[in-house]
Image: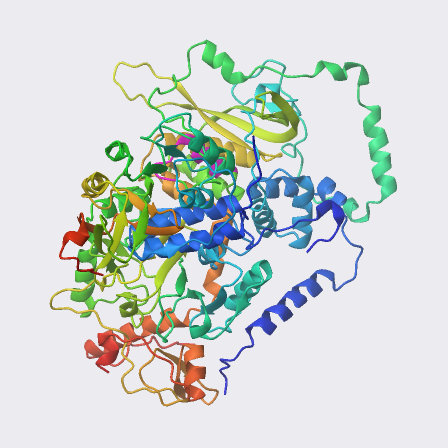
Amino acid sequence: MQKAIIYDEVFDAQLHYRMLLDSMARPGKINVLHDVDVQQIPAGINKTSLLIALALLNTDASFYVEEKTDNEIAKYIALHSSAPMVSVQNADFVFVSGLQYTGLIPSLKRGTLSYPEDSATIIIDVDSISSLASAQSLQLTLKGPGVKDTQTIYLTGLNPAILDDVKEQNMEFPLGIDLILTDNKNCIVCIPRSNEITYITNSTTDNGIHRS
Amino acid sequence: MVENNKYTNKYNFAFIDEATKKEIRRKLLKAVAIPGYQVPYSSPEMPISRGWGTGGLHVTLAIIGKDDVFKIIDQGSDASVNACNLREFVHQMTNCKTTYNTAEATLIQTRHRITEEELRDDQIYIYQVPQPEPLRSVERYEFKTRQMHGEADYAKMWVSLYESYVRDGDIMLGAGYPVMVNKRYILAPSPIPKWDVPNLNHSNALHLFGAGREKRLYAIPPYTIVDPLEFEDVKFHTENFSGTECYRTGYKKAFMDELYFDDGTKHFLINDSNFLDKLAEDMEPKQHANKYIDQL
Amino acid sequence: MGYIAVKGGTDAIHNSQQLVEFYRLKDATTPLDIEQIRSQLRMAVDKVMGEGGMYAPEYAAIALKQSEGEVFEAAFILRAFRATLQRKYYSETLNTREMFIKRKISASFREIPGGQILGPTRDYTQRIIDTSKATENNEDIQKFLTEFRKGVDTEHLAEITTFAKVIDLLKNEGLLKPVDPNEDKTLADITREAIKFPAVRSARLQMMARAETGGLMALGYASMRGFGNVHPTVGELRYGPVPVRVKDASGRLRYIGKIEVTEAETISTGRTVKKKQPPSYTIGYGLCFGQNDTKAICMGILDTGMRSPDINSPANDQEFVLYHTEGIEAMGFTNHLKLPHYVTFQSDLKNLREAIKRSGKQKVEQPVSTE
């Protein structure tokens, strides 16, 4: 059943996009999307990721969702954005769960030297994004355009294999893929291909000292 | 506007339809992720002539929101005729507040200048670009310049700079002096004068470039290394205004307009109209700092 | 004090807008009716629709009126308006074999299926200025229409329908170059994404369909004069309405109306690429809105030219042809030179003065006029 969602495709989309643009321009900066009362969202995906889908997708941008059964998420995105679902190799936007990673990143398009923008953007659901370390959090440090010196953030709910695969895919700049991470509190953080990624798992075991 | 029922026509907020806005928005994210790379985009016609700022308008209108404060300058001036026309169009289509005050603006659209006043990290700077391809002077074909960028094969460009030096004793490039972004892509900085080029390096603000007629978007994120092209022994330098000062304020460290009065005498005046106004009113606008200004 | 760096810009442009409107209306003559423009300035309307990239005769007429008859400006207004409209459907491929023929000629054969149909054309008129047009009135028009209708053989009206094409004859005889299986047949949409080079043929033809007639003509002409290598025979030129259909949401074809188009198929001797391959003909294709023979034929010439790229021949060079026949962009950019450029000029001035200083000479010697 189609149910109208309370989402202003002009003004909500614009405000969410500005947050995204700021995050992409300032890798590692945590931005918070203003909340929108979206009803009946499918299980298995952060609402924030769906808001990004609504802000960016339409008939001209394809997507792929990795999900276990019955394509509820894909149906939702297709219904509300009119974007076509395509195979993982051809998708412009790919929605991935940070924990249930199945190794699809090497299959994504990375662009060509003449047209490096013909590449995928992945939206990854994690549990939390924070500027402070917590138990079991992964410490991620970024360096590159948009970052003053270095920028460090702490994530939970992210399989480090994702970062390893992204680093591998982004070795030959300008070819590569760009990342948008979301958590369940409307936080987003971006990692464009231009940035160097280093990470430490279980950062709090490091004498419990918080780094920032 | 035609108010006849048969022809009534309503425009979307910010004029551009939402599908095209999304396309421009997606392309801008790519432009930011690949600093200095020119992303092709659909560049729909605007009710403004091609070559008169359509690319800058596409960027502005695709990102602007109700609460933005918009400033637009042409040749450094808020009052230049084309800036006035575009300001009015943006205002009519968005009802956004507009301003001359650089510090108050959240979005600043420009043709040919960066403001003298330092930009902040909550400001986005948008350039109208006539010719986005820095290699066009050495290679006329688009498919070849794309390959050259793809392979970072910039030999032709370096040769042309060297030849210019041999011929005239200096690199004879003026406004639009080519820069290397993030040690990877050569980029055409709209054409801003050499005076402004150092202010692209490690800027606090995000810089977005729109070339409407040529259908290209590109970006320099904040805190990005931007180096003007130069040789070990032939260095880049900014326009030399030594020995001149603004006839109204006596200020020396700014890009100057050269004016001829009716009696034939020549005078200099600060080009950036808002910066000039602030100095004239004894305010102290914070100017960009860079090693070239510091040497003066 | 000659220089005014104050906020006069807005007032200046408002006054200028008022003045241009005044010039349009100052003699207080009878307002031009849109229907009159549409009906009596048919060729101008067709050109504006073609270059504007939008089939809307009424809007083209309004744009012509608004721009005081400046066709470039009118096409630009129409295109800018078009850009605000949502694209809801893509039409199915037009089938010009279904065209209700108003004009159909072939230069390559004396007789073609259905015969040569000259239709409305000024080709064989003497271009003598007709001063009676100066005093033409409604009575004259009615008289002409009555006379004209008397001459129409209403009994045989139904016989004229649709006809097979000349190229079908050549194809059946095996004279046409087979379609290159490697040619990229992707359907681009140049209004939704920037053209990429090398461009696929669909993108090239779309660009030309919206290109400026004069620009296409200059290059098509150049090609025939030797700055290119295409001097074709017009296989067929036809003009008339063609039905347009779209698929609705359920996938059913729906007829949505007719548009008038001019279509040209030009024949050239194809280059033999492989040895031992017999020679063959290649077809250049042109299609544009309304009646515009020149544009359709020149499209055909340039289509053929661009299919055998040669950077020494401007008319065979796709980047050269497509970028520079785009009238609206060319007009905008050439006119942007009127904008103030004193910042960039100042930067150049600094360079030049310093270079002169370095060269040790004071000034470049100015030639002295002898007059």
Check residue A46 for magenta coloring: no
Which residue is painted at 41% across and 79% down in the image?
Answer: B275
Give residue C331's position: percent from left, percent from top.
50, 53
Indicate the colouring scheme: rainbow
Which is more toward the observer, C215 or C189?
A: C189
Give the left or right position of residue C370, taking residue A13 as reference.
left
Placement of C354 over or under A60, stated as above or below: below
Placement of B179 over or under A5, stated as above or below: below
Give residue B5's position: percent from left, percent from top.
75, 48
Which is more toward the observer, B283 or B89?
A: B283
Which residue is painted at 76% across and 43% down in the image?
Answer: C35
Q: Quadrant of residue B243?
A: bottom left
Which residue is painted at 42% across and 16% down in the image?
Answer: C176
Which is more toward the observer, C309 or B195?
A: B195
Q: Is residue C353 visible?
A: yes
Give the left or right position of residue C215, taking residue B158 as reference.
right
Q: Is residue B42 visible?
A: no
Where is the C terminus of chain B found, in terms of image quarters? Answer: bottom left
Give residue C295's position: percent from left, percent from top.
53, 36
Check residue C201 for magenta coloring: yes
Q: From the image, give the main secondary structure of the stretch colored magenta.
A: helix
Q: Quadrant of residue C284?
A: top left
* Residue, far right: C139
Where is the N terminus of chain B found, in terms of image quarters? Answer: bottom right
Q: Which residues are magenta?
A: C196-209
Give residue A62's position: percent from left, percent from top.
41, 35
Placement of B34 over or under C89, stated as above or below: below
* Residue, far left: B233
